[in-house]
Every structure is written in C-alpha cells, then in structure tokens.
Amino acid sequence: MLIKPHTYLICHNYYTFAVLFSILFFSCQAKTVEKDEKIVAKAFDKTLTLIEIESLLGPNMTKQDSFFFIKEYIDNWIKNQVILNNAQNSNMGNIDDINQKVENYRQDLITFNYLKKKLTEKLDTNITLGQSKEYYTLHPENFELKQNIIRFVFIKMPKAQEKKYNLWSKFGKADDENLTKLAILALKSGGNAFIEKNKWIAFDDILKVVPIITYNQENFINNNRLFKIEDKQFVWFIKILDFRIKDNISPFEFVEEKITQILLNKRKVELMQKIENQMVKNASKDNKIKIYLPQYE
C-alpha cells in the first residue's frame, strides 16, 4: 500500500536534516519554551516530540554523535509507525484478541511491579548462619559437586627473586604473616599471588591462572600437596590445603551463598502468597468482591 504524502509528513532527506538541525539548535539554547510542545516528526495520527528524543541523548555525546543518533531514531520511529498503520489497516486477524493480550500484559506488569514493591518493603533478607547450615544438613542431595574443587595458596615469583632469596624453602613453612610478605614481594616484582586459605575454587578455574598440566585431575590432586612449576621467567609455588572430588557433597563454605539465595527465594514466595491472600481477605471483608456461583463456595 502506497503512503499518501499528506499522511506521511517526513519523506525527504532535506526535511529530515532540517528537523535534526532544529533539535540540535534548540537543545543548545536556553529552554524558554516548553520542549514537549515541539513536534519533530509526524506520521499518520502519531507525533514524536523533542523531549522524547532529547531525554535519550547521553551527557557525553558529541554533536556529531547526537546528529546520527537522532536521525536513526527518527527513521526507526517513522518506519515503525508506517508498519503499525499498515498492520492495523490490513486483515491480520482478530484485533480484539490482540488488544486483550495487550491489556492482560499491562495488568500483569502492574501486578508484578506492585508485588515487587511490597516485597522490597516487607522482606527480611537476613539469613543467619544457623539457618543456612540447617538447610545444608537437611538437603545434602542438592549440593553434589559437579567439578573438582580445592583450597590452595600460590605465589608467582620472578625466577631471579626466587634464587636470590631462596624463597621456595621459605614458602613451604611460611605462616600467615610470612606468606603475606611473600605475596607482597611477588606483586611488587611483577608476579602474582593468591593467599585466601578459606576460599574453595574450582580446579578448572585454577588451570586458567596456574600452568598445571594434567590429564587426570583427581589423580593429580590426590598426589600433590606442595610443588612448584617453572617457565623461563617465573616460578609458581603451590600448596593444596584441602580438596573435594566431584560427585561428592560440596563443603558448606562452597555453597553458602547459593543456600542464602535459596532461602531468600523461599521467603519471597511465602511472603508473596501471604500478601496476596491478605489483600483478597481485606477486599472480601470490605465487600469489594463477590462470586455469583453458589457451588464455588
């Protein structure tokens, strides 16, 4: 279907350029006129105003960036209006059915946002350590490991530093204080370190940082506790403190955050049901609702 010139008002590049120039001009001037009254494009019975576009411009946009953004936005807006108008005028099925779906979506969106607001106001997000451990104890089947995990520390040191200070022997017997000193020395020397002893990490993730070569993770983990790896520039000192092999139950510390989310989600569901039931109860008490099917009661 051809678009009549009097219904599709923006159809020439010259006019588009003029609109863009006007937008950039007005956005740089003192705002003495209500911006929402300035129409920058029109298609059929719909209008696009300056304030709608200007609100989308980033604060750090250059004039050139703004120009191309505005042009693309107007072009897309016009295209969408033309397609929508053609669709509305075509025999595309039951328009009432579409309107009903739109209305259902609108109602669902209002309901969702309202309940989200009520949850934010009323939800107790404090999960105690005791509650988390209780859930962990009662549901061990939910925490089966899908990968090997370890607790470990490592120091990545330039080889020159290691030889100068004989750091390997110091690493093997280092307490927390001396381990921290080694980590600081490594970082200052262009190396790296990880000394969070209580943190469980997937062995696959460790292989991305430490150049361990193994074709059997379980065998390697079981047979290595204190070892070092060298390349041309660096030496890695590695100590495995503890490990769990996949298909066993995860240690509590490894899944504590997951349990917190599980318990919070359970609270959300329970609180939402409570809020919904209470609202229905209040509406019924105030005679705001009525069911006209006797057998429904």
Image (spheres, rainbow, N blue to C red):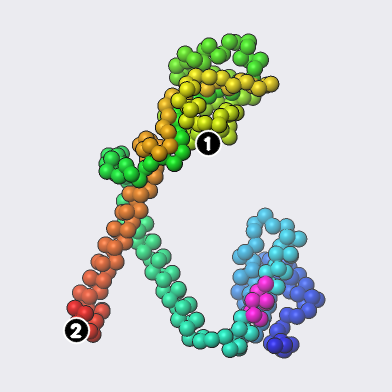
Amino acid of disc 2: Pro
Can the viewer see residue 200 in this picture?
no
User: Would you name the residue on which mark 1 appears?
Assistant: 204
Which residue carries the number 2 mark?
A: 294
Q: Secondary structure at mark 1?
A: helix
Q: Residue at x 62, y 24 (%)?
A: 191
Q: Main secondary structure of the magenta part?
A: helix
Amino acid at circle 1 = Asp
Q: Is residue 3 above or below residue 40?
A: below
| Mark nearer the viewer, 1 or 2 | 1
Q: Residue at x 66, y 15 (%)?
A: 160
Residue 151, quarter of the rendered image? top left
Q: Is residue 229 visible from the viewing direction of this image?
A: yes
For the record, the magenta segment spans 76-83
Left or right of 186? Residue 106 is left
- State the separation of the CA atoms marked 1 and 2: 63 Å
Q: Position of residue 96 (x, y in %)?
A: 48, 86
Tell me: residue 219, above or below residue 286.
above
Magenta run includes residue 81: yes
Mark 2 crowdedness (10 Å alpha carbons): few <14, some 14-19, many ≥20: few
Q: Residue at x 76, y 70 (%)?
A: 21
Q: Identify the mark nearer the N-term, 1 or 2.
A: 1
Query: Where is 260 relative to 223, above or below?
Result: below
Residue 269 image point, x, y percent: 32, 58
Name the secondary structure under disc 2.
helix
